[in-house]
Image (tube, rainbow, N blue to C red):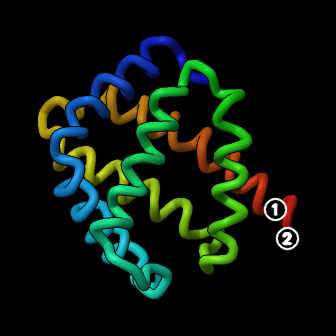
Amino acid sequence: MLTSRQIDLVQDSFAEVVPITDAAAAEFYRRLFEIAPDTRALFRHDMAEQGRKLFLTLATVVDALDRLDTIVPVASELAIRHIGYGAREQHYAAVGSALVETLRVGLGPAFDRDTEAAWIAAYTILSDTMLAAVREKV
């Protein structure tokens, strides 16, 4: 469970990333492919479009952090779809690392320890939810 302060930190910092969505998405995928090169093969389509989808999904999740019960079905469905794309359990940690590093670069000094901890907590909830759906499905 996230505290109201953590929710505010994630939502406020995400609002700062929205104007640089395209650059942030490119940075995210660059970092993901650096951390987990095997993930590159999972993305066969237009990466700009993929980046837009990523940030739309993030926006949905970030907006609903104070209503986690609404995120669970969406996250579970997303995880099940990603099985078909070839995503594996170890990719979730790589995605989390790439996300944190992208936010660190994009937000600069505004990405302080508390903000980083809030994002890690939020991503942990999301990835745990998704991994539970994957394990239930397979």
Q: Residue at x 41, y 55 (%)?
A: 54
Q: Name the residue tied to disc 1.
A: 135
Question: Residue under circle 2?
Answer: 138
Residue 3's spot in the image, x, y percent?
Answer: 53, 15
Q: Which residue is drawn at 30% across and 23% down?
A: 12
Amino acid residing under circle 1: Arg
Q: In this view, does 22 lie above or below 4?
A: below
Q: Few, some or many C-alpha atoms within 10 Å of disc 2 (few <14, some 14-19, many ≥20)?
A: few
Task: Tell me the element at label 2.
Answer: loop
Residue nearer the viewer, 121 or 77:
77
Q: Distance between the residues labelled 2 and 1?
A: 5 Å
Left or right of 113: which side holds 10? right
Callout 1 environment at 10 Å: few (<14), some (14 to 19), or many (20+)?
few
On screen, residue 115 above or below 47? above
81 lies above or below 14:
below
Q: Is residue 71 toward the left or the right of residue 61 in the image?
A: right
Residue closer to the observer: 26 or 135: 26
Q: Is mark 1 on a helix, strand or loop?
A: helix
